[in-house]
Image: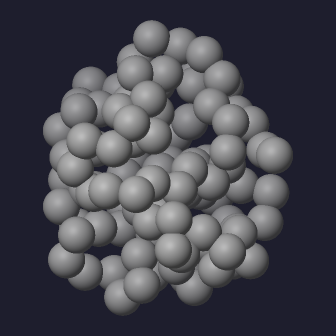
Amino acid sequence: MASIESKDIHKIIVACDAGMGSSVMLAGQLRKALKGQDVEVAHIPVNAIPADADVVLCHAGLAARARASAPGTVLIPFQIFIGDPAVTGLISTIKNGGTVHG
């Protein structure tokens, strides 16, 4: 399991199957929630995760593909696109400090 300190998170990728729809909404919510933080948020297809991603968020159904696309990167799978505890926990840790595991 990979981990990263919150102060070292500068790029979050919301990975999805096609790069549209729900992932765009989640990326927008993350940008708004992390406004003022030095964190870039992008939505990218799961098979195109960039090497400079610090944290990857993806639906649990895509987790295996995301791990294959970005081995060694902190991966946080979630179940629901709005209000998932994994996502709110990530936001809280970035804002308040701590270690993110995934």
Q: Quadrant of the C terminus?
A: top right
Quick check: can you spot residue 41? yes
Count the numbered circles shown.
0
Q: Quadrant of residue 32?
A: top left
Q: Nearer the viewer, residue 8 or 74?
A: 74
Tell me if 13 is positioned left or right of 23 in this view.
right
Q: Residue at x 19, y 77 (%)?
A: 21
Q: Position of residue 67 (x, y in %)?
A: 71, 69
State the residue at coordinates (41%, 76%).
16
Q: What x and y, as percent, mark residue 65?
A: 64, 80
Q: Does 21 sit above or below residue 80?
A: below
Specify whether residue 39 is in view.
Answer: no
> Going 54% across and 75% down the picture, which residue do you hit?
62
Identify the residue at image location x=62%, y=54%. Answer: 75
Relative vertical location of residue 40 with respect to residue 13 in this rendering, above or below: above
Q: Is residue 77 rendered to the left or right of residue 44?
A: right
